[in-house]
Image (cartoon, rainbow, N blue to C red):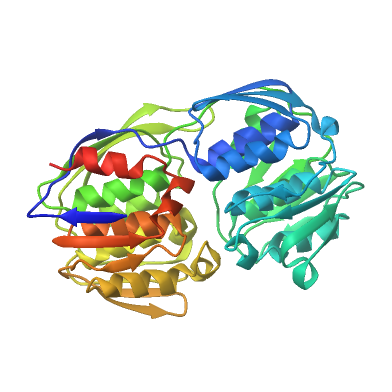
C-alpha cells in the first residue's frame, strides 16, 4: 500500500471500529459447544475469526453468517465430530491455542496447522498443561510448534501455575477443564484478559475467581445465548493515538469495549497527557462499552511496565509511535511476550520506525524511545503483522511525502476497512 501525505493533514470525524477479535473468537467457540442456538451481533469478519468459523464447520457445527451477524446451532460438546481434514487456523494464535483446550476433551484425533507466522509461535505453553490433564499432543519439537495433533478425552482437573500472564494459556486450560473430572484451577503471575470467564458465565457456566486464581468445575453444560460484540479497543488504539499525535485532529470512536483488563492503552495515553474523554454507553452484562473522543495533545514520555503490560500487550507498537512524538523519553519494559507475537514485535517496531527516522532502541524486554522526532517517508514492511502494518500507516500521516507499507494486506486479519476509515478521516 502506497500512502501519500501532501502538506499538513488533520484527522477529524467519527468512526466505529470492527468488533472485538478476542470476544468474536470466543462467542463462536462457546456457541459451537453449547446446547441450542447462539446469536452473535457485531462479529469481527476479519480472516482470523472466519478461520475459527471454518474450523467448527469442519467439526459438524452449523454456522450461518450474514455480514457481522452469526447464528450458531450449537451441537453441545458431545456433538462435535472428528474432522475429515486438517484444521487450518491461518494467522490466529487465539484460534489454535483455545481450540487445543476444547479438543483436549474430545475423544477423537485432530491435526491443526497455520501460516508461516503460526509455525514459529510456541504451542508448548498450552500443550504442557493439557498433557498434564491427560490429552495426547504431538507435533514439531515434541508438540512445541505446528503442525500439531491432539487426541483428547479422559481429562482430569489440575491446578496450574502459569509462568506467563496469558489469556490464551488461561483460556485453553479452562476450556479443557470444562470437560475434565473435578476442578481445574489456573494461577497467573499477573491478571490477563478475562473475556473467557465473562463469556463462560454468559453461557450459564460457573467460574470461580479469587484474585489471580481462576477455577472451573468440570462437566458443566453450556446453553446458547445472545452476544453483542463491542468494538475492539486494540483496533481503536491506532486511531486514538492518531488523534493525539496528528496536528489539529479530533476524533470520536463509537461503541468501544472498555473491559478493565484491556484498557491499558487508555491509562497510558492519560498518563502521557492525552486529551481523552470516555462516555460509557453500556455497562454490559457481558462486556462494557463506551464512546471515546480524543484530540491533538501535548504528550510526555513515561515508563511502562509491570502489571500494566498484560493490559496493553497488543497496543505496544502504536504506543511506541506515540512515544516518538512525546516530549522526553519513554521506556517500555517487562514486555518479553512481544517476541512471540505474529513477529518479534520488539525488533520489528524498532527496525521499521528507525527507517522513518525515529530514535528508538531495543532492549531485552522492551524498548527505549526518544521523543520529539520528525518522521520521514520511507519504504517500510509490516512483515505480515497486522498491528505493525496499522502502526506504520498511522506513522505515514506524520511523514510528508510517499510512504510505502509492504505486506499491508495483513491488516485485513483484524481490521478489513482500516484504510477506508483512515481516508475518510483525513481532511
Q: Nearer the viewer, residue 98 or 221?
A: 98
Q: Residue at image x 29%, y 68%?
A: 379
Furthest residue toward right? 154
Q: State whether residue 250 appears in this view.
A: yes
Quarter of the figure that contains the N terminus:
bottom left
Furthest residue toward top? 37
Q: Nearer the viewer, residue 393 or 22?
A: 393
Q: Quadrant of residue 407?
A: bottom left
Height in image: 228 above or below 122?
A: above
Height in image: 108 above or below 309?
A: above
Furthest residue toward front? 2
In the rendered picture of this protein, how many numbered marks are placed on residues? Answer: 0
Q: Nearer the viewer, residue 302 or 399?
A: 399
Q: State whether residue 399 appears in this view.
A: no
Q: Percent from the top left, x then y, of residue 8? A: 8, 53
Q: Percent from the top left, x then y, of residue 113? A: 70, 56
Height in image: 70 above or below 403?
A: above
Q: Residue at image x 70%, y 41%?
A: 55
Q: Is residue 11 left or right of residue 159?
A: left
Q: Percent from the top left, x then y, of residue 76? A: 79, 28
Q: Percent from the top left, x then y, of residue 83? A: 81, 41
Height in image: 50 above or below 167?
A: above
Q: Is residue 226 left or right of residue 151?
A: left
Q: Quadrant of residue 197?
A: top right
Q: Quadrant of residue 141?
A: bottom right
Q: Is residue 109 left or right of residue 34?
A: right
Quarter of the figure that contains the C terminus:
top left
Amino acid at each position: 500500500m502506497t500512502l501519500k501525505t501532501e502538506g499538513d493533514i488533520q484527522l477529524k470525524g467519527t468512526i466505529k471500529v470492527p468488533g472485538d477479535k478476542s470476544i468474536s473468537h470466543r462467542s463462536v467457540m462457546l456457541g459451537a459447544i453449547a446446547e441450542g442456538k447462539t446469536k452473535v451481533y457485531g462479529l469481527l469478519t476479519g480472516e482470523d475469526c472466519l478461520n475459527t468459523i471454518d474450523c467448527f464447520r469442519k467439526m459438524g457445527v452449523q454456522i450461518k453468517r450474514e455480514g457481522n451477524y452469526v447464528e450458531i446451532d450449537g451441537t453441545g460438546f458431545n456433538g462435535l465430530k472428528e474432522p475429515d481434514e486438517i484444521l487450518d487456523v491461518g494467522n490466529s494464535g487465539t484460534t489454535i491455542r483455545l481450540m487445543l483446550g476444547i479438543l483436549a476433551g474430545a475423544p477423537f484425533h485432530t491435526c491443526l496447522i497455520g501460516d508461516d507466522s503460526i509455525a514459529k509461535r510456541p504451542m508448548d505453553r498450552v500443550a504442557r498443561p493439557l498433557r498434564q490433564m491427560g490429552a495426547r499432543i504431538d507435533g514439531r519439537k515434541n508438540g512445541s510448534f505446528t503442525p500439531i495433533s491432539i487426541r483428547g478425552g479422559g481429562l482430569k482437573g489440575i491446578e496450574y501455575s502459569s509462568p506467563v500472564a496469558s489469556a490464551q494459556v488461561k483460556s485453553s486450560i479452562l476450556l479443557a477443564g470444562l470437560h475434565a473430572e473435578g476442578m481445574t484451577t489456573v494461577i497467573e503471575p499477573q491478571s490477563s484478559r478475562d473475556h473467557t470467564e465473562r463469556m463462560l458465565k454468559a453461557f450459564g457456566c460457573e467460574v470461580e475467581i479469587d484474585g489471580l486464581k481462576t477455577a472451573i468445575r468440570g462437566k458443566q453444560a453450556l446453553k446458547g445465548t445472545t452476544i453483542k460484540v463491542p468494538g475492539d479497543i486494540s483496533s481503536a488504539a491506532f486511531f486514538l493515538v492518531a488523534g493525539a499525535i496528528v496536528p489539529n485532529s479530533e476524533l470520536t470512536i463509537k461503541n468501544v469495549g472498555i473491559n478493565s483488563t484491556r484498557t491499558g492503552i487508555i491509562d497510558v495515553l492519560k498518563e502521557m497527557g492525552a486529551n481523552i474523554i470516555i462516555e460509557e454507553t453500556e455497562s454490559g452484562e457481558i462486556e462494557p462499552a463506551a464512546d471515546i473522543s480524543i484530540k491533538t495533545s501535548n504528550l510526555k514520555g513515561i515508563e511502562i511496565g509491570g502489571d500494566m503490560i498484560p493490559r496493553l500487550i497488543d497496543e505496544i507498537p502504536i504506543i511506541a509511535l506515540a512515544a516518538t512524538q512525546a516530549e522526553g523519553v519513554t521506556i517500555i519494559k517487562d514486555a518479553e511476550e512481544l517476541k512471540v507475537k505474529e513477529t518479534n514485535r520488539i525488533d520489528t517496531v524498532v527496525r521499521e520506525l528507525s527507517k522513518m527516522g525515529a530514535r528508538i532502541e531495543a532492549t531485552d524486554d522492551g524498548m527505549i524511545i526518544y521523543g520529539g522526532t520528525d518522521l520521514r517517508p520511507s519504504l517500510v514492511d509490516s512483515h505480515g503483522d497486522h498491528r505493525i502494518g496499522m502502526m506504520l500507516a498511522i506513522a505515514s500521516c506524520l511523514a510528508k511525502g510517499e510512504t510505502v507499507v509492504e505486506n499491508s494486506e495483513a491488516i485485513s486479519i483484524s481490521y478489513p476497512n482500516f484504510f477506508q476509515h483512515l481516508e475518510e478521516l483525513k481532511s
